[in-house]
Amino acid sequence: MEILKEAGVLLEGHFKLTSGRHSNKYLQCARIFRNTKYSEELCGALAEQFKNDRIKIVIGPAMGAVQMAYEVSRSLHCENFFTERDEEGKMSLRRGFVVNPDDRVLVVEDVVTTGGSVREVIELVKAAGGVVVGVGSIVDRTGGKIDFGVPFRAVISMEVESWEAEDCPLCKAGAPAPVKPGSRKI
C-alpha cells in the first residue's frame, strides 16, 4: 500500500470501471510503471509467488498489463506477450505471438475487478493448447473472492466497493457523471 500511495495509484471520486460498474475509488496502476523502482518491486514480488511453476510465457491484456507482463517475465527469465483486441473487439494474439501446445503460461493483469479480460486471455491460451499455470495481479479488488479455476495470486488484495450503474449511490446523490480513466472502450 505504501508504494501505491507514493506512486499516486489510488484515486478517489466517481469512476466508471471497464466492467461498466461505478466506484468511488479507482486504482490507476499505469502510474506504477512510470518509475522502475515501483514496477520492479511489485512485479518482482508477484513473480516470486510463481517462481517454482516453470513458466514459459507471461501474457497480459493490452493496455494495462503490457509493461507488467514484461516486468514479471524479466523476473521469471521467460518470454512475455500481450493480447489485444482485433477489429471485432475480440481478444487475440497478434504481432507474431504464438502459444504452442503445452506451453506453461502465467496470465497477468494490473488490477482485477470482475476478471473479464483475464478470462478472455485464459480462453485464448487454452484454445491454443497452452496450459494456464495461474493468474497474477498487482491488485485484487475482490478481496480474494474471484475464482479463475487456476491459482490466483496478488501482491495486494483489497475489497473496493463498486455498483451497477443503476444502483450507484453517487449517481443517486446527483454526483457529476463518472470519469472513465481506463483504456478500454465500454
Image: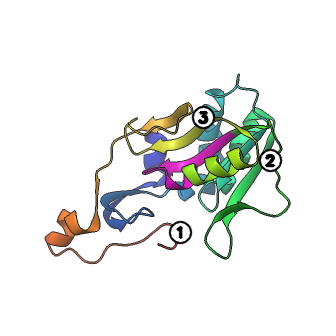
Disc 1 marks which residue? Answer: 184
Q: Which residues are magenta?
A: 106-118
Asked if residue 88 is positioned above or below residue 140 in the image, the reply reads below
Pair 2/1: label in front: 2
Which residue: 17% across, 63% down? 169
Q: Give the image location of residue 122, x and y in percent.
A: 62, 46
SS type, badge 3: helix
Which circle's residue, 1 or 3, is located before the other in the chain? Answer: 3
Disc 3 marks which residue? Answer: 46
Using the rendered view, name the quadrant where residue 61 is placed: bottom right
Total numbered labels placed on residues in the image: 3
Q: Amino acid at mark 1?
A: Arg
Q: What is the distance, in whole Å, between disc 2 and disc 1 at their CAs?
A: 24 Å
Q: Residue furthest right?
A: 96
Quadrant of the image containing the N terminus: top left
Tell me if I can see residue 78 in this picture. Answer: yes
Query: Residue 99: which numbered mark, if any?
Result: 2
Q: Nearer the viewer, residue 36 or 14?
A: 14
